[in-house]
Amino acid sequence: MEAAKPKSGGARLCSFCNLRKPALKRPKTLHQICRECFYDVFEDEIHNCIVENQLFKRGERVAIGASGGKDSTVLAYVLSELNRRHNYGLDLFLLSIDEGITGYRDDSLETVKRNELQYGLPLKVVSYKDLYGWTMDEIVKMIGLKNNCTFCGVFRRQALDRGAAMLKVDKLVTGHNADDIAETVLLNILRGDIARLSRCTSITTGEDGPIPRCKPFKYTYEKEIVMYAYFKRLDYFSTECIYSPNAYRGFAREFIKDLERIRPRAILDIIKSGENFRIATSTKMPEQGTCERCGYISSQKWCKACVLLDGLNRGLPKLGIGRSRGHDNDESIKDVKHMTGSKEVQGKPCGTLDF
Amino acid sequence: MQLTLEFGGGLELLCDSKKVHHVNVDLSDGEEKLTMKGLLSWAKTNLIKERPEMFMKGDTVRPGVLVLVNDCDWELSGHLDTTLEDKDVVVFISTLHGG
Ligand SMILES: [Zn+2]
Ligand SMILES: [Zn+2]
Ligand SMILES: [Zn+2]
């Protein structure tokens, strides 16, 4: 791993310890930082974020939405590390969703199973097949590639809640990072979805629902997550979901990355803008009730998953599609990111189940 | 010049799903040194088999692709102007992939 000499011209040293050669430039601060100091600040910032926002209470059971991808893998690693180091007193679990996507999810689940052993965290896998009677492969066979993201997103959101209930956890944490949140802010603006815009920057959501969700990586840059995983040689999975794309979201992501290159702080500023939006009293928020069929939270008589399932089971899969307000059925990114063709590199996969 | 190029985070899918490539890159006529700029255009021609737009944008890597030269962020060594030497290890990682 210690390859040939670094190329930094040799002049400057790490701006923290002033001893070692820097290994990366922090996008957030533009500091040049060595690997050891980077691990420290990276972990400390997440710890501070957890403490300042009171994300957890001692003795809580916490599920980490684990897709096998970089964000949730780094989250599982760092959270178990911080839990030990700072004695949070948390019981941590990995929670994965098996959508039933051959060649995609089965491979990424292997990664999660290795993480289970590597980090010593108990793993629970819940499958679409068990919960709904359908795998994504079967759904796609039935409905084609056009609307499958709707199914995937709606089903995944509920599957995570159901898995969390099975684990009897108090909270669910997901690996959404600062770039993801900035992208979602932008998308919600582009869609005029003010309700989601005001929710999507919250570090904790669903406090009124069965299981609150939080995002300890809210202020963590994607670049640093990937650098951390690279330097620590963490084992993650990075092949795309094989089902269809969300071009609009891919476009927003590309735009965020272009901005970041010119001015890395743009990502934090967009999050800040999102935070500062307040819902006007005239904006009607949907009332929350429960689904008459399955008891899941819903603003309609039946929840979205039950409507979709009903359509599938009656052979009318188009039922329930197109009535939702946005394209996604969650405020966040990772639910509806299918990619086209066999192997796309653009954007993130829908199959990433932490949202 | 012997170099090791490594593609990760999904970029390996653009070059036959092979992550590590031991390559021999010759200087073009009239060039005295190989820079990252030269290496990128060499890689685009010789290694990337499909969808080069996932790897490059203009004459540099696509935003969201991290580059490390000998395990050091290329943002510290001058991006495209980074000079390469024999036995250097260059790593490309996409951050755009998976969560
Ligand atoms: Zn240092
Ligand atoms: Zn229902
Ligand atoms: Zn999907």
Image: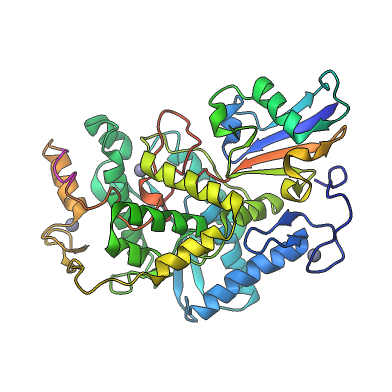
- Display coloring: rainbow
Q: Say whether residue A214 is visible.
A: no
Residue B83 rendering spot, x and y as whole percentages: 83, 37
Q: How many labels does the image show?
A: 0
Dominant secondary structure, magenta: loop
Asked whether A182 or A210 is in front, the reply is: A182
Picture residue at 69% right of the left edge, 54% below the top: A232
User: In front: A108, or B30?
Assistant: B30
Position in image of residue A145 (x %, y %): 30, 32
Give percent across and percent down for residue A189: 34, 56
Q: Does A184 sit left or right of A15 as displayed?
A: left
Pick the front one: B97 or A294 = B97
Q: Quadrant of the N terminus of chain B?
A: top right
In the image, what residue occupies the spot 87% across and 65% down? A19
Q: Nearer the viewer, residue A106 or A243?
A: A243
Q: Quadrant of residue A354?
A: bottom left
Magenta span contains residue A318: yes
Q: Can residue A116 be seen in this view?
A: yes
Q: Where is residue B26 in the image (x, y as percent from the top left)?
A: 83, 21
**Which residue: 62% across, 25% down?**
B48
Which residues make up the magenta segment? Answer: A317-322
Q: Is residue A307 magenta?
A: no
Q: Which quadrant contains ligand 1?
A: bottom right
Give above or below for A25 relative to A99: below
Q: In which quarter of the image is residue A73?
A: bottom right
